[in-house]
Amino acid sequence: MSYPTIGQLEREIAQRISAFYYEQIGHRPSQVVCHFFDTELVISLEKSASLVELKLISGGYENLAEQIRLSLDKTIKTQLQNLLEELIGKPIIDLMTNTNLATGRTAIIVFLQQLPEVRNPESIPKANLKNLAE
């Protein structure tokens, strides 16, 4: 079995996250960037606010838009975690999301117990390579 490089894995995660948000929320972010840092994965989404959320904000219903986003994030969290575990091939210890509707950005931070299996683990910034042996 041939493992992907860390760059290939990050690109695959970005593409699947973009598709996931489109399927679940009906809006595809303009850009999704993923980076591993040791056993942490940081994912940023640009222009992640949906048309409904933006319409509510422009109509003066910022609090309602925030409540809707919090509910959406909570509703899709388990599915998002399952998708990421499938892609990474390692269990997730914790997953946190936050969306700032004022800037339209979403941040996802994923904590893993082990590094993903990739061909070039030395390319993961701050990688503690002893995590590979565990």
Image (cartoon, rainbow, N blue to C red):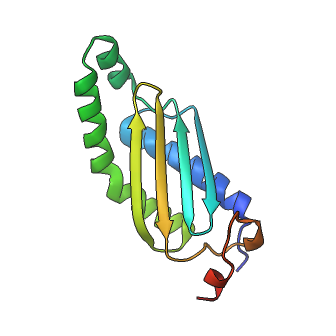
On screen, residue 12 versus residue 62, left or right, reads right
Residue drawn at 28 percent across, 11 percent down? 59
The image quarter in which residue 33 lies:
top right
Q: Nearer the viewer, residue 14 or 94?
A: 94
Q: Residue at x 28, y 22 (%)?
A: 62
84 is higher (above) or lower (below) than 47: below
**How many marks on residues?**
0
Residues 63 and 117: in front is 63
Report the residue at 51% width, 74% height from top.
90
- Left or right relative to 116: residue 73: left
Residue at the outermost top position = 59
Estimate the x, y position of residue 23 in percent, counting from the top left: 42, 42
Closer to us: 100 or 54:
100
Q: Please state, as top left, top right, bottom left or bottom right, where the C terminus lies in the image.
A: bottom right
Is there any visible trace of residue 34 in the rendered image? Answer: yes
**Residue 93 horizontal side relative to residue 63, left or right:** right
Residue 38, located in which quarter of the rendered image?
bottom right
Q: Position of residue 14 (x, y in %)?
A: 59, 49
Identity of the residue drawn at 65% across and 56% down: 10
The N terminus sits in image quarter: bottom right
4 up-or-down from 107: above or below: below
